Amino acid sequence: MAVEHPVAAPPGDQTRIHNIGYRNYDGPRLGRSYATRSLYSQSLRGSYGLGRSVKSKVLPMLLFVVMCVPAAIMVAVAVATKANDLPVDYTRYAIIMQAVISLYVASQAPQSVSRDLRFKTVPLYFSRPIETADYVRAKYAALASAMFILTAAPLIVLYVGALLAKLDFADQTKGFGQGLVAVALLSLLFAGIGLVIASVTPRRGFGIAAVIAVLTISYGAVSTLQAIADAQGTTDAIAWIGLFSPITLIDGVQSAFLGASSAFPGAVGPSNGEGVVYVLVTLGLIAACYGLLMRRYRKVGL
């Protein structure tokens, strides 16, 4: 039986140049601002799983519902009983739901930045017109916006329900405005802390555990020390101890300047002078978080 043997091609025939149709882009160049806005919008959508798999939508959407359902129940009770006021003040709602808020930031902060670190895509961002400051601002603003949506939505439910129940319009509008200021400050602070912690590790699971640990342990330690100070009669120390936990910082600011009742033991909130310190520490932490993120991503982008 005949066997065919392949015939070697001459050396000159082994190389081919193919025109596969690539063309240079000659359209408009939208620049840094467009790239930053796109990164912000995509990060914000990703914080609620939009544009991602169904599995990615479950937790953030579930937490959003959990945040809003108690507000809806309170409104229903107020309407049914014809109460003269809502069961919970607008400024108190986020403090009551702090566990849900902490779980949200713990789950979404690593989702926002850890994957970029794990798959080493951060240098690719910086190879384009976008710069380190643009990346940090977009990620920070996106997570803070997502948290503001999470915390402001139940306040809107309470406010609309209060108006439907024909409660005093001026009082409810004032309380609603104070609540929005409080949750805006909370969103900036928690987003910064979550992103700083999550940016340390490319492992999302480690980031989630670290954020939960920092927020939970700090609040538990501060609450315990405040309770001990209250039991020993050293009430002057209660307000100063509250400086060492993010949630008690927000509690102190709103009780000092937004007319909220304090959740500190014995309802001993900070005075106006101590409240100034609370504001300065809160704003300082937000600025420090931004600075740490800038420093971190300057190193990563090299």
Image: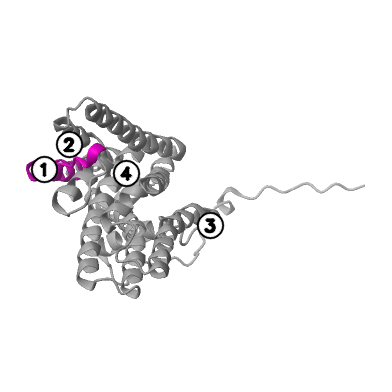
Q: Residue at 39% x, 70% y: name it.
A: 79
Please give the range of residues in magenta. Answer: 265-286
Residue 263 x/y as whole percent: 27, 43
- Who comes first in sequence, dot 2 or dot 3? 3
Label 2 sits on residue: 239
Residue 184 x/y as whole percent: 24, 56
Label 4 sits on residue: 195
Residue 201 x/y as whole percent: 38, 35
Is 215 or 136 nearer to us in this picture? 215
Q: What is the crowding at mark 2: few (fewer than 14 residues within 10 Å), some, or many (at least 20)? A: many
- Who comes first in sequence, dot 2 or dot 1? 2
- Who comes first in sequence, dot 3 or dot 1? 3
Label 2, label 1: how many angstroms apart (C-alpha)? 8 Å
Q: Is residue 109 magenta?
A: no
Label 4, label 1: how many angstroms apart (C-alpha)? 31 Å
Q: Is residue 279 magenta?
A: yes
Q: Amino acid at mark 3?
A: Ser
- Residue mark closest to the camera, 3 vs 1: 1
- Who comes first in sequence, dot 3 or dot 4? 3
- Who comes first in sequence, dot 4 or dot 1? 4
Label 3 sits on residue: 53
Tell me if I can see residue 145 in this picture. Answer: yes
Label 2, label 3: how many angstroms apart (C-alpha)? 45 Å
Q: Residue at 17% x, 27% y: name it.
A: 234
Q: What is the crowding at mark 4: few (fewer than 14 residues within 10 Å), some, or many (at least 20)? A: many
- Quadrant in which the C terminus is drawn: top left
